[in-house]
Image (spheres, rainbow, N blue to C red):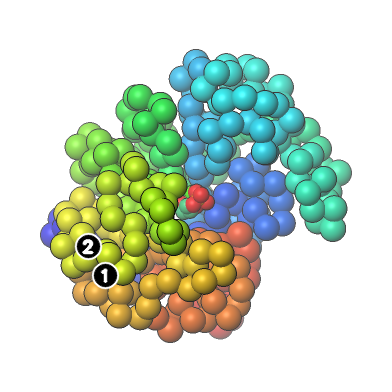
Amino acid sequence: NKDKDPTMNDERFLVIGHRGVSGLAPEHTIPAYDRVKEEKGDYIEVDIQMTKDGELVALHDTTLNRTTNGTGEVRDHTLEEIKQLDAGSWFNEAYPEKADESYEGLEVPTLEEVFQRYGKDTKYYIETKSPDVYPGMEKKLLELLEKYNLDGANEHSSKVIIQSFSQESLLKVHEMDPDLPLVQLLWYEPGENGKYEEYSGVTPSPSDVTSEDLEEIDRYAVGIGMNYRYDGELFYDEDFIKEARELDLLVHPYTVKSESDMNLLLDWGVTGMFTNYAGKLHDVTHDE
Ligand code: G3P
Ligand code: CA
């Protein structure tokens, strides 16, 4: 992708707050997002789903079951219905040692509320989740970016990066706004077809990601993001990272927890990481 700006973010290493600081607060809630900035993270990662009435909301799963006190598919509920739900208490129950009374009754934020709260004071790393389930999701996303002046020529500051496992979704965004930096996510799990293989459009096995695959990704994206471990087992290696970096692709593995993995991946030359602990990654990557 010769149009992309290789100086994106001044080639700074990027600390990406995965679902917010979701190791310490309920994922995709305002307290989790607030902490990204407090802990000096560069990007808030926002997974988006779409409600029955076409509103983009910050949720990882296509169902409400895991992270709210509701049940069923997000797409079968209106925003008004979803706004009644408690998106914080599950965290207190799952992690009593991290529980905080203030998490009880937290709302599911809309993407628009997130933009209204942080404006241009932060950066957003937005994932179109299950775009095959939500026709028109990309158009809605771009309309919101335009409304909040987050679209267009943002390549120098890269206020917004769009990521997806779905190549088709990224290509739709690219066609509508070629200025938006895109990251192709890769998923690999050993054995039969990985859960994302059917719609990622890109061969997910690290040993099978060929130079041609990387060159194809490079035509529309500025980088890749991959699960560098599955079930504790390490995939990928320094040579793979080098090959991607020779194309100037950004390399952002997910989801990095331990300081030893942070250091290993830094040694390999990755250019950022998704982590549930933005403060820890900031401390590992900054001397001051
Ligand atoms: O977007 C990077 C990483 O978040 C992908 O995995 O399932 O946490 O969205 P997931
Ligand atoms: Ca994600």
Residue type marked 2: Leu
> Is residue 213 shown above or below 178?
below
Q: Residue 232 at what x, y percent from top left? A: 57, 69
> Is residue 59 shown above or below 224?
above
Please name the residue that numbered disc 2 is placed on.
214
Q: Residue 89 at what x, y percent from top left? A: 79, 39
User: Quadrant of residue 127 in the image?
Assistant: top left
Q: Determine whether, in the image, residue 223 is placed left or right of residue 114.
A: left
Q: Residue 101 at what x, y percent from top left? A: 86, 44
Residue at x 27%, y 39% (from the top left corner): 168
Residue at x 43%, y 59% (from the top left corner): 191
Quarter of the figure with the C terminus: bottom right
Point out the residue furthest to the left here.
2
Q: Report if residue 144 is visible in the image.
A: yes
> Is residue 6 shown above or below 159?
below
Closest to the observer: 196 or 180?
196
The numbered dot on residue 244 is 1
Q: Residue 55 at what x, y percent from top left? A: 49, 23
Badge 2 element:
helix
Q: Determine whether, in the image, residue 245 is placed left or right of residue 130.
A: left
Answer with mark 2 or mark 1, whichever residue precedes in sequence: 2
Badge 1 element:
helix
Closest to the observer: 37 or 175?
175
